[in-house]
Image (spheres, rainbow, N blue to C red):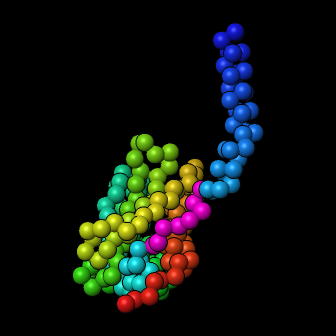
Amino acid sequence: MLRLAKYVLLAGAVLGTAAFSPSLTAQRKAAPVNSSAAPVPAPILQGKKAFISFELGDVSSFPSTYSGGPERAYNEFFQGMQEWGRYQLVADPKDADVIFAIRFVDSPGLSNPQIRLGISDSRGRVSLWGFAEEINGAFRKKNRDAAFSDAITQIISDVKLLVQSNVAPPQP
């Protein structure tokens, strides 16, 4: 009991000091998290043509957990990007300015399955950006399917926000 009381007293003293320390408060105000943004790579902002790559992810969840097959994320992402119309979708990566690689991931270490999107240069050699969205769990299959589609919609929204909230640097 004495050891626990000592720990609580010590923790309280440390927390109390940290909470009221003028230097720590000043540091928090001076450098908020994500206060400045690094530039978004030019191919994402300036690109006109995009290739969407299907990366085979985890297949064991289809069709038992989610309807469709492993290509479901690709199909829904492709359709959503086509509806957005920001990029002309091309059938050959050699014709693209940027490549979007979509994948479903359901690994044992994850609390929920994810939809992951990698964005790379047109040769696929340099990773430019990436997103991951969790698929919310649900008891019924129709609700899991809706959550899957919601995660795809959110990935597309992530890309839109990235592109639309950044001004493309002028081309030389």
Residue 108 in picture, x, y percent from top left: 41, 42
- Choose top left, top right, bottom left or bottom right for residue 128: bottom left
Foreground of the two, 155 or 119 = 119
- The structure residue drawn at horizontal position 41% and vertical position 84%, both measured from the top left corner, is 46
Residue 76 in picture, x, y percent from top left: 45, 72
Residue 107 visible in the current orientation: yes
- The structure residue drawn at horizontal position 45% and vertical position 73%, both measured from the top left corner, is 40
Residue 160 in picture, x, y percent from top left: 52, 76
Residue 152 in picture, x, y percent from top left: 49, 67
The residue segment tinted magenta is 33-40
Q: Main secondary structure of the magenta part?
A: loop
> Does the stretch in magenta take in 35?
yes
Residue sitting farthest toward the front: 23
Foreground of the two, 64 or 99 = 99
Foreground of the two, 57 or 69 = 57
> Does the stretch in magenta take in 48?
no
Foreground of the two, 16 or 100 = 16
Residue 4, above or below 91: above
- The structure residue drawn at horizontal position 26% and vertical position 68%, both measured from the top left corner, is 125
Residue 160, above or below 126: below
Residue 103, above or below 80: above
Residue 146 visible in the current orientation: no
Residue sitting farthest toward the bottom: 172
- The structure residue drawn at horizontal position 27% and vertical position 85%, both measured from the top left corner, is 95
